[in-house]
Image (cartoon, rainbow, N blue to C red):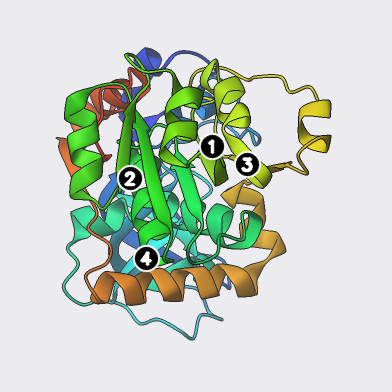
Amino acid sequence: MRALVCREWGPVEALRIENMAKPAPGPHEMVLAVKASAVNFADSLMVQGKYQTRPEFPFAPGLEAAGTVLRLGESVTRFRVGDRVMAMLDHSGFAEQVLAQEDQTFPLPDGMDFVTGGGFLTAYVSSHVAIRWQGRLERGETMLVLGAAGGVGLTAVEIGKAMGARVIACASSAEKLGICRDHGADECIDYTTENLTERVMALTGGKGVDVCYDPVGGDLFDAAVSSLGWGGRILVVGFVAGIPKLATNRLLVKHRAALGSSLRYFRSNRPDQLRTSVDELVRWYGEGKLKPLVSETFPLDRAVEAIQVLTSRRARGKVVVTV
């Protein structure tokens, strides 16, 4: 089978399309014929050896996929050959076939195509896990979303609205903020032209926000912490702009909390809550509350270009590789 192969740690540009052996399923695994697999920032970290886990060589990046069930492990009971599914993966989604764990695989919802399904799970479930289980967002609260026009940021905007919150979207251009408004944001802040903390305080009558969803990090983190009200929670989801530092006295004085959220480890440590998250997201999708945005698709031969679009922060919504 063809795959985007990583044979040593290095830049994304070093990856090549090569032939790899077809995978064989273990007892609780399935082989999927991949139709689509979304790009995630972690893909670029993984091939450089900078991610939390380091697969054995050779491997392909790609942390999720949608496709059809091709072969079943002997203990698989929830699926049949030919089923349309979407799956969370450890890696190797950028390939013609991939191994998927039965408990990390879910039926593709009615009316959802493979391209949408290939970019649905990682972003939406990452955001839901952070906001629902870590942030404990309540109806009527206010949530600030940084990087709100990106692949995970837009999902946070939609999830916040589905949970009954007031959502303030933060992005770097009027174009990006227009996308955020289309996906339900109540208020928008352009952090390149406005002071983030001052604008948040003006929008909240000096109270500050209850929750901040931060997949960006970097210099915005400091301003976001200052934007939290009493009892506010900042959700540390990613660091595309760099890993910030936090003086803990800023948490103590206003009873604030900084909470990390990693889907990779949540999957194995909280499987029941994971399934609850997926079930709620699929229900919201069926009700029209979630409108996944795939801004660009690339064929497998151009998968390196797809990753570059994301890492350069040019993406609006999800970027998906089709197979």
Q: Give the amino acid type for the residue marked by disc 1 in the picture.
A: Gly
**Closer to us: mark 3 or mark 4?**
3
* Real-space CA distance between mark 1 and mark 4, rounded to the nearest whole angstrom: 25 Å
* Residue at the spot 28% in from the left edge and 77% down from the top edge: 83
* Residue 190 x/y as whole percent: 31, 24
Reply above or below: 24 against 227: below
* Residue 293 x/y as whole percent: 21, 48
* Real-space CA distance between mark 2 and mark 3, rounded to the nearest whole angstrom: 23 Å
> Mark 2 touching mark 3, by CB under 8 A?
no
Residue 94 or residue 150, whichever sits in front: 150
* Real-space CA distance between mark 4 and mark 2, rounded to the nearest whole angstrom: 12 Å
Task: Determine crowd level at label 1: few under 14, some 14-19, many 20+ residues with C-alpha closer than 10 A.
Answer: few
Q: Give the amino acid type for the residue marked by disc 2 in the picture.
A: Leu
Q: Mark 2 points at which residue?
A: 154
Q: Give the amino acid type for the residue marked by disc 3 in the picture.
A: Gly
Does residue 40 appear to the left or right of 276 in the view shown? left
Q: Name the residue under label 1.
A: 206
Q: Name the residue under label 4.
A: 162
Q: Which mark is residue 291?
A: none
